[in-house]
Amino acid sequence: MTATVTPQDSTDVVEWSSRNQEIATVSNDGTVTALKVGTTTITAKAGEYSDTCTVTVDCAHKNVTEVPAKPSTCVEQGHNAYKKCNDCGKVIEGSDELLPLADHNYGDLITEVPAKCGVEGTKAHYQCSVCDKLFDESKQETAREDLVIEALEHVASDWKHDETNHRYSCSRCDVSDTEVD
Ligand SMILES: [Zn+2]
Ligand SMILES: [Zn+2]
Ligand SMILES: [Zn+2]
């Protein structure tokens, strides 16, 4: 910066100062040195007169990190690729805005496991391979207990006889000699 004192025969000397010397300093000859991003005021003072100039130090974005794109999953929002300045923290290319969550990864329908005598079955369902949540056949989220098919009761059919007991056998599960009430 330059400052001119008039009239030419004045003996006043220009004194330079910077309000915020962390952002920029100024030397005796008016040379301004930028130190960090921000705004400061440089004052030139001669005798009882002074004038000021606002100096803004911008970031040159010389120290840049390239952040690759990260796709969203059903549990974590991703983002597109962007570049960020390490010095000032600004995104200088692209956007770090988060993308919406992705749909669940349903995969193939897990087929029904029918109930058997004394053994619970499981309804046909989907399970997300990312978040492990369970979904019914129409892909509505569901609880594991809602997928349970109640265990079947034995079906009494033929009487069986031996020397001491009368027993039924179950016609469904083919277990013979199963005592049924
Ligand atoms: Zn920067
Ligand atoms: Zn999921
Ligand atoms: Zn049975």
Image (tube, rainbow, N blue to C red):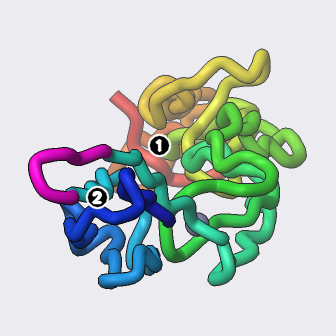
Residue 118 is labelled as 1
Query: What amino acid type is highlighted by mark number 2?
Result: Ala
Q: Tell me the SS state at disc 2.
A: strand
Q: Which residue is mark 2?
A: 44
Residue 86 versus residue 48: which sits nearer the camera? 48
Residue 147 versus residue 117: which sits nearer the camera? 147
Q: Which residues are magenta?
A: 46-51
Q: Residue furthest front?
A: 9
Residue 24: image quadrant is bottom left
Report the predominant secondary structure element of the magenta stretch.
strand
Q: Tell me the SS state at disc 1.
A: loop
**Residue pictured at 37% horizontal, 57% vertical:** 5
Residue 138 seen in the figure: yes
Report crowding for label 2: few under 14, some 14 to 19, many 20 or more residues within 10 A (C-alpha): many
**Residue pictured at 38% horizontal, 52% vertical:** 6
Mark 1 lies within 8 Å of ligand 3 (Cβ measured): yes
Q: Is residue 113 positioned above or below 88 on the image? A: above
Question: Rounded to the nearest whole Å, what is the CA distance between mark 1 and mark 2?
Answer: 95 Å
Percent of width and height locating residue 123: 67, 31
Relative placement, left or right, of 82 versus 4 is: right
Q: Quadrant of ligand 1?
A: bottom right
